[in-house]
Image: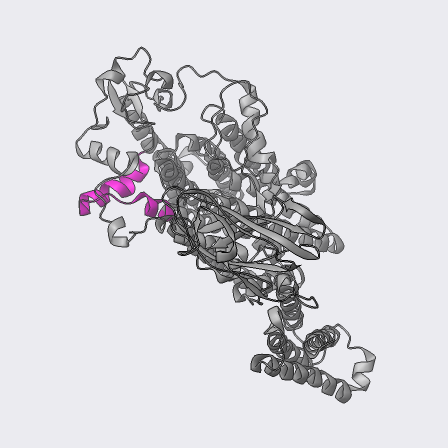
Amino acid sequence: MGFDEAGFILSLLAFAYILIFVFSYTSHKIPEFMTKNKKAYGLSVIGAELLLIILAILDLSGVLDFGGVSLMPLIFAVSGFISGAGAFLRKKYSPERCSGLIKFAARSMMVCTLIEIMIFNMNSFHLLFGNYSPVQLDTANAVTENFDTSSSKTVQSGNASIEFKNLNMPVGTLTIESESLNNPAVTYSISFSDDTNKNGYRTGCAMAEVINSNERSQTVVCNFSGNTYDLKLDFSADDGDVITIGRIAVNIPVFIHFSFLRFFLMLLGSIGIYILVFSPAFRKSFKDNSILTKTLAYSLTGIFIILSLVITNCYRYSDPDHSLKKDFTMETGNQITQEIVDAFENGQVSLLREPEPELLALENPYDNSQRSGINYAWDHVLYDGKYYSYYGIAPVVLLFLPFHKITGYYFPSVWAIWLFGALGIFFLSKFYMSFTNKFFRNVRSSLIISGLIMMQLITGIWLCYNTPNFYEIAQSAGFACVTCGAFLLMSSNVLGDGKIIKWRVCLSSVMLGLGVLCRPTLVLYCFAAFLFIWGGLRKMRSQYTAKNSVKPSFKHYLPYLLCALVPFAVIGGVQMVYNYARFDSFFDFGIQYSLTINDFTQSQYHTHFVLVGLYNFLLAIPDFAPDMPFFIGNTVETFNPQGYYFIATYSAIGLIWKALPVLSYGYGLKAYRKSNGDYKRLYSVIILVTCIVIPFIIMCSVWESGYAARYSVDVAWQLLTGALAIAFIMFDKANGAVKSILNKLMTASLVVCFVLCAAQSYSWILTVNMPASQKASFMAFERLFEFWK
């Protein structure tokens, strides 16, 4: 064994010794041998730390050559010092007073360092203890096809290859410096012959993907056996593309890359899980820990809003010429941002564009097969020789029309969707915190926070930012209106304790009514609001009777009823008049007249199509993949429909996997029996109608328009709200041991929710047509977690 190998082993042993010390010294009870020999044990730990420092100096000075694991002693020394210092804090306090979070953080830092070095940098160890000599391969001596060795470039588009004969040496890594002119990466198929297959190439079992301007991706680990004899690289250039290759070498080590982003994600994730499961502060009930719980809840809400801004900009940056000035000085727009605006400014409900004569001359213009070759307005409504828009006018009246009146420009849909989405995220948190504060103050803070995070993650709004079209405007605006209306209704005290706040009831009706003017489907939640309003009437009668010993007259209810119902009547009347002005019917929203992929005037109901939607919304199982984001829902199962079923987005992960607490509905009857109170029947009916029946009706209704993952914005958080209510009731009635188990299950559910929702959203982000440089950045980010590549 040489000095280099000995130094490597000593580094591992020294770090392992400090690791054992940290775990022992931060245990509930310090081991007896430590307490008896504090000085000796302390000196030995300091000695291990000094050894790491010495090895780090020898490594950095070049006295010892650690190869690919260079910098490992330095990283171990820094992590050992910080964690060891945290462990030594116990000297100043008794074990009872020592912060559990400090103890866990010290341990977690050591473990995360070990994972970062030994797992995420596993390829850096590949050449250790092996007879691998670095050799640069000369393309001038290679057999090439469609490749110019003098310029190191592909000659023309199409397949190209570089073949090296008679290497006769072990090959542990292959380094290819290359770059594509138009694409974010160059992919090579590697064929080789080795001692297990000397007389012919093994093909299709090795590949390299070299990302532009990403040095680490240039070197890939090769798991060949014995000597490698022949080596061939096959690649392809697209039309107009040029691939440039620098050096090609073998047995260059993959040097350690300590990713602070990856490290801190692991560290913060582990600390977050610890806080939710073990932290004494979050074991307290919501009522005993309300300030901390609310502070964390709204801090997380701010993070979610910032994250929505990041995703929005992922789309914006796909335009190389993006700028805020360009965004807010747009002279064109889409069906909602421009066409309805122009129509309203012109004093009409029909759009300014006149239908094409060829379209009107068709026997059935709603039949897509008859419209071939005609330049018509796609996905617009055609009725009585005029174009109309099916989409709601609330976003137009509230945002797009005023902006155009003031500035003369059209408000950008990308920022409108972000604005509506951010408002929806904020009001969803406000609703949830009001809901839990009113009914579940005895539940642990950790469960309240876990429920909030899951509710935000599963909304579906994250799938709207990436494709900012008029579909997403309607959905994000409806999301903002319904969440705002739900918060105002919940905080108005029509349910639970407290005096009814009539102005909140009024504003709630306004917002829920505006939701219908965003998406007609959301009218169902207005019907659900009547149950809340009825609850307010019962509460008013009960309070008046208890105070006056007589039943109240109708005048007592009148101000409340006016606040609750007049906004619905006014806004509903506006919608009905708008419907009549377009389609000669107060109740016709006009979707059947859409010029889209399907003729809605002829579409026939099929139960099979309903079941397809229910399966994909609720039950679709995610697939595992060895590439980022690892869990994917890129397929939509239709179960052989034997007919036409439209799929808008190929991304389905069932809600019961993303939000495991949805399974709490199985305990609904038991929770009902365990709960008490005069209003438990009303509350049960509200949960049944608002959180189960209406979401199921909406999910079933997509049979005609087809499946899109973003439709979950109308149903997901509502479904989870009812499930969490049941889960919290069961938790409140459980004993201490069961509560501890349920809390851990909730945290585990949160981890699963985060992984699956992040995977689904990330997969959807990648569908944007990005410039090569932006795509390369995403691919480099993926490599942080695809550590085996």
- Where is residue 86 shown, x and y percent of the image? 64, 77
Provide residue 322's location: percent of width, then percent of height: 30, 52
Quadrant the C terminus occupies: bottom right
Residue sitting at the far top: 363
Residue 111 image point, x, y percent: 66, 67
Question: Is 8 a magenta residue?
Answer: no
Q: How many marks?
A: 0
> Could you tell me if residue 488 is visible in this image?
yes
Quadrant of res 104: bottom right
Give the main secondary structure, helix, strand or loop, of the magenta stretch. Answer: helix
Is 367 rendered above or below residue 446?
above
Task: Write the start and end of the magenta stretch as one range.
Answer: 393-419
Q: Nearer the viewer, residue 99 or 63?
A: 63
Q: Residue at x 44, y 17 (%)?
A: 603
Identify the image quadrant of residue 654: top right
Q: Is residue 578 left or right of residue 647?
A: left
Q: How is the image coloured?
A: one colour
736 or 62, which lies in front?
Answer: 62
Q: Is residue 529 above or below residue 780?
A: above
Q: Pick whichever, 535 or 559, lies toward us.
A: 535
Residue that lies at the very extreme toward the bottom in this rendered image? 39
Q: Does residue 435 appear anywhere in the picture?
A: no
On the rendered image, what quadrant is the N terminus found in? bottom right
Q: Nearer the viewer, residue 235 or 696?
A: 235
Residue 528 rendering spot, x and y as whole percentages: 48, 33
> Is residue 776 left or right of 723 when viewed as pictured?
left
Q: Quadrant of residue 555?
A: top left
Using residue 349 as the reference point, say whether residue 548 is left or right of it: right
